[in-house]
Image (spheres, rainbow, N blue to C red):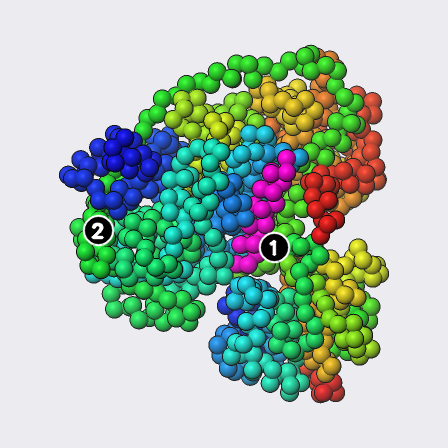
Amino acid sequence: MKFAVVVFPGSNCDHDAYYAVEHVLGQEAAFVWHKDTSLGGADVVVLPGGFAHGDYLRTGAIARFSPIMQAVQAFADAGGPVLGICNGFQVLLEAGLLPGAMLRNRSVKFQCEHVFVRVEQTHTPFTMACRQGQVLRIPIAHGEGNYYAEPAVVERLEQNRQVVFRYTTAAGEVTDAANPNGSVHNIAGLCNERRNVVGLMPHPERACELAVGSADGLLLFDSVVRALTQGVLATAR
Amino acid sequence: MTAIEQAIAQHGLTREEYQRIVERLGREPTLTELGIFSVMWSEHCSYKSSRVHLRTLPTTGKRVLQGPGENAGAVDIGDGLAAVFKIESHNHPSFIEPYQGAATGVGGIIRDIFTMGARPIALLNSLRFGPLDDPLVRRTFAGVVAGIAGYGNSIGIPTVGGEIAFDESYTGNPLVNVFCLGIARADEIVRGVASGAGNAVYYVGAKTGRDGIHGATMASAEFDERSAEKRPAVQVGDPFMEKLLLEACLEVMKTGALVGIQDMGAAGLTCSTCEMGSRGGAGVEIDVSLVPQRESGMTPYEIMLSESQERMLLVVRQGREAEVERIFDKWDLHAVRIGTVTTDGRLRVRDHGSLMAEIPNAALTDEAPVYHRPMARPRYLDEAQQLSLAALGAPAPPKEVFLRLLASPGVASKRWVYRQYDHMVRTNTLVVPGMGAGVVRIKGTTRALALSLDGNGRFAYLDPFAGAQLAVAEAARNVACAGGQPIGATNCLNFGNPERAEIMWQFARAVEGMGAACRALEIPITGGNVSLYNETDGRAVLPTPVIGVVGLLEQAEHAVRRAFRTEGDAIVLLGEARAELGGSEYVKVMHGLVRGVPPVLDLAREAALQRVLIEGASSGVIRSAHDCAEGGLAVTLAECCFDTGLGADVRVPALEAAVADYADVAALFGESASRVVVAVSAERTAELLALAAREGVPAEVIGRVGGERIHLAVSGRTVVDERLADAERVWSSGIDRYFERQQAIA
């Protein structure tokens, strides 16, 4: 199975995603430069974390214009699984592949720490190996992860079961204290209506080995391998 | 004052130095030449006051691949790999503009590392500030932390550790020392040389502006009330540009088309051209009109002295230019040829072809002034070294002292700080900040590196020789606690005005102490940085020698953490206490004093202790280890409990103090050196005690891990008995509490 890891200038979790796929998951990974126009026949696309183009405007605002994003859009339109992590999630929002926007954390500071997220939906290619309601321990590292969307949009996301991850306590309770950045409805990650594009602020690629603190993030990568091998994606389409 | 005298003074040169310039050139210098000399002969670039002392430091060893004199040092870590590392200060800019000052400090040290062909994988920092109840200090503190975070997070290099201390002397002169480590193939280390007549000299990176002109000269003078006017001498950082430079330079280095490369840090284009030429035994000729410029109308003087950030100078092999240009183009960076390598050993600067400066490289580098500055033992020492316990009155109850120390910002949790640093990116961080040494694994090998920065300004103030030794011992001990064998070090020496004999004496004694400790512990110093003139309005900072030690673990999975892990484990104290309170956190926090003599250090014992720690880690007998430092044994035990929430029941070894009332205080909060608290399973306790006995290290079972309280007794009397959760709350909020109100508004 081949994973394309898109490299924007300023991406800095590209190597981590590559390592998680190639060395922990044992699947094939390839870097794809943002000026390329082809994903090289990849089965899965990962938009990694970082500060694409320095994020001097809004996070992800310039990256959406990179030539590769047309290929990513087409890949998503065809039902291919796309995972946006942190800055990659922000790029997906700016590109309109997912709804909503990011505000600065309510602490007005960059925050790097382990948090707990509850899996709200297992019916996506990146969560099908999880249990419904399973609590994962995964780190965040961002200054702008305070998810916001108009109330009507949030309402629709909830109704369509597009909220995939929510910040909770270790016991899985949705509380304000467990919300690290002020995201509306404690939203940590979501999917599109078609459910093949998933974005989340926490870094699953940083939680693939117990040696670095947690292996819970590997479930997302295991999920997509299972989804592709079992042909589940076809039914999702 | 004549116009010439005025020009000399404005350039921070002495009349004698000006005379030397005239003699060396055989004529009066042009204004551009005067500017070039002034920055290269500044304290910051020339080390003119410190060089004679630095020469005495041990810099060689079987693992040393690169010692001082290059952009960074390098040591062999096996598997054909090298660890490339260095520490640098950015104290002066960080006071004038905290965010950008600190950010550009991070940017500068990262460039030093990737310039050597190494991919940076870890950052650490050592910071000093005034007391946090001063609003100006809070602003500086928050700005520095945000600046370090802003740069390091964006470029994607984890900040895996460091240390912070507070003292009034740093109020008007904070210290910001930043360490970076990278990994390179040992046989592919790139050096900052220009050689091969006719090879092209390229400029790549950000455009040159008027920012930072005379930054190096600013860093070589004291501060006064007009320092804020120096804000234009502070540069502005662009971590995105540096990220592009980092990736593009590493890609170019792989082609073999480079002869040498150097970043333009302090003294910018001036320093990089003459140093590269000097190292390569060649000359460099450039035309400043070809240098990409951000502003119009810049003079050759300004272009040569600008310290605009994120710029590199490259020497490219003849015929390989297009290949290099193509790689930079890919990263949307513009590499511009600005000159050529020559054979005559001179720096020649032209502007649209006209000659503006021509100076022998040697005059700027090897032949820069070297001073044997006068030294005198400071008058304050005799009084400061007297600590009369009797004069302090009766001590507060141990419980109260315990909680006050836990809440003291120097001891309290630094989570407020390191939460703002991305400490996990690159997925190598095995031991995160706030836990003693930071530990990063080396992917593709079984190995890991343990990294620690340490320094204690109070100890160095009371006895610079001992203070520097204690800093080396503590950094090496922290690394050994994690299971790392110390294999190299880098130092950052922060002192006041060297033109004052008492400051120079502090400096010289500290360097002697550092050298002696490094020799005894067999840790070569492969480079570093000196920051002098850390004074505001004539008041110097505490002399603050900081050392960064790199330790090697053969097996990453043997990394030892500080937290107690298993209920029922035995708590063993390695090492022995004396009644030592001189320079301690206790005396500072409870009595507001920096007095007494620092703890005694026996380097042979220290080395033996570290052997026990390293062997105990690799054999797995040691389950956790944490050294005793600020706040003594009581604070160390508490910190071992906090991370996992497992309590401890401990019989603290009793001591006799000169004043009987202070016996418990000394036992609990004294800071005797060479002591480590380790946890060991009941079954393997005898094995650990035997290992310690074999090395002649005192070892004693002092208690058990478990429960929800921290209970400390001396000679059968309970002296501290706190609910762990309560103690942890006090410790966790020690820094946060100064910023709570601001957060409420946000």
Please give the name of the residue rendered at 37% of the width and 44% of the height, measured from the top-left corner: B214
Question: Residue at (61%, 72%) from the top-left corner?
Answer: A91
Q: Tag 1, which chain? A: B
Indicate whether B187 appears above or below B574. below
- Measuring 48% from the left and 77% from the top, which residue is drawn there? A35
Q: Check disc 1 and report its element: helix, strand or loop.
A: loop
Quick check: can you spot residue A27?
A: no
Q: Quadrant of residue A204?
A: bottom right
Query: Disc 2 sits on a residue from what chain?
Result: B
In the picture of the structure, the residue carrying the numbered disc 1 is B422
Q: Which mark is residue B356?
A: 2
| B261 is within the stretch colored magenta | no
Classify mark 2: residues with Cα within 10 Å, few (<14), some (14-19) or many (20+): some
Mark 1 or mark 2, which is nearer to you?
2
Marks 1 and 2, how far apart at CA: 46 Å
- Locate the C terminus of chain A by quadrant: bottom right
Q: Work out which residue is located at the far left of the displayed protein and give it.
A: B26
How far across and how far down the image is residue B541, in percent?
Answer: 51, 30
Q: Quadrant of residue B579?
A: top right
| Front-lying residue, B259 or B340 | B340
Question: Left or right: B279 with respect to B443?
Answer: left
